[in-house]
Amino acid sequence: MNTSSVNQSKLISPISSSLDLILPQLPNYPFTEVERINGGKNSQVYRLTSHTRAQFALKIYFQHKAEQRNRLKTEFLSLKFLKDQGIKAVPKPYLKNESQGWSLYEYISGEPIRDFQVTSQDITTLVDFLLQLKNLSKHPASHDLNLASEAQLSIQGIIDNIKNRLNKLLEIPKDTIENKLLNQFLQDDLVPFLSELIVWCQPCLKEKLMDFSNEIVLEQRTLSPSDYGFHNALRQDNGELVFLDFEYFGWDDPAKMISDFLLHPARMIDFSLKQQFFSEILAGFSENKTLSTRVKIVYPLFGIKWCLILLNEFIPEQLLRRGFADINPIDKRERQAQQLAKAKQMLTQIKGDYEQFPYYY
Ligand SMILES: Nc1ncnc2c1ncn2[C@@H]1O[C@H](COP(=O)(O)OP(=O)(O)O)[C@@H](O)[C@H]1O
Ligand SMILES: [Mg+2]
């Protein structure tokens, strides 16, 4: 694609800049090819090819007004840290411009990985990568890194986060059928289950002398990419995986990192592969004697959190943020009904399996 043929009207956002402004600032300019390879809600990614056939990935970030996190800075500095420490399976960061909202990275030539293509070897590779991050958490430079996005380091913190999300949904006026059904689901199903979980986890915590309110100590935290998995990886021609998307990277509770992989509602990884993931990651954290109990406790709580994330579609400001401000009311109702059905399915699954954590062999 020629630079001038790129639809630039879509690039307008609070801090993003147009390609015409960005490209001349880059080494190797002018480029023979500028190809958009991704245009999501949070960023646009372009493959740039120079006349020497060198390739680069240009990522233009959209900063949402209400957002506190600087995703660009987090991603760039996290990748710099990882590369400085010798991590191979991530792209090299080259240049960033925070005021214009873009960064330049090594271009990774590879294929996306669909859930059904994930192999047992891929799970091992992913776990090895997470364990490399865990080892880096011992490195002094890691202490300059921030918390991961939505990091929750105490059980109380997870519950507070759930309650905040829940309250936003409970405040929605019951002025449509969908909103009434939403309210009914929350009041009759989700809220009582949350109360049940809060009671259920107490003896488990006591048995292992774990704390409800205090945050886990530094030695038990790990570095987590947060939004990780095969949707944020590419398979190179030689078969090796490269991991992408470090906008939410930082310190976190490994129990959250593990639960999120097992629960993510959009990821259809085979049950046996998830079991393998759980067993390998636990083996890698074997010195953390309470981790498996902690996962067992937080797993249903994060299940509830995922239900509430699925229901974001009911919150007017979230619809705006997702670019659905002008969505036709019939489509909106359909989307809401679908999301409610997914949340119900998730809650049913969690209710059914939380007492017998399903991923132990
Ligand atoms: N360094 C890169 N090299 C090649 N492709 C990339 C690179 N970075 C991103 N991409 C492509 O763009 C997509 C979106 O990038 P990602 O960093 O995941 O951003 P988002 O936050 O929008 O999900 C990736 O799935 C991948 O296909
Ligand atoms: Mg991504």
Image (cartoon, rainbow, N blue to C red):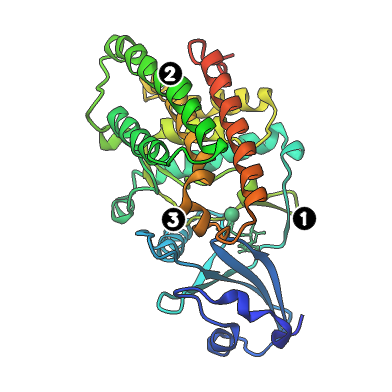
Looking at the rendered image, the quarter that the C terminus falls into is top right
Tell me the element at label 1: loop
Instruction: Identify which residue is drawn at 61% across, 32% down.
Output: 342
Q: Is residue 349 above or below residue 38?
A: above
Give the mark toward the camera: 3 or 2: 2
Q: Which sits earlier in the primary sequence, circle 1 or circle 2? A: 2
User: Looking at the image, which is closer to me, 18 or 189?
Assistant: 189
Which residue is the site of mark 1?
A: 237
Answer left or right for 96 relative to 49. left
Tell me the element at label 3: loop
Q: Position of residue 347 (x, y in %)?
A: 53, 24
Q: Total of numbered circles in the picture?
A: 3
Q: Which sits earlier in the primary sequence, circle 1 or circle 3? A: 3
Q: Position of residue 282 (x, y in %)?
A: 48, 25
User: Looking at the image, which is closer to me, 304 or 76?
Assistant: 304
The crowd level at tag 1 (other Cα within 10 Å; few <14, some 14-19, many 20+) is: few
Instruction: Identify which residue is drawn at 65% across, 72% down.
Output: 46
Q: What's the residue type where badge 1 is placed?
A: Asp
Evaluate if marks 1 and 2 touch, with contact meaning CB atoms under 8 Å apart.
no
Q: What's the residue type where badge 3 is placed?
A: Gln
Looking at the rendered image, the quarter that the N terminus falls into is bottom right
Which residue is the site of mark 2?
A: 193
* Distance between mark 1 and mark 2 Cα atoms: 47 Å
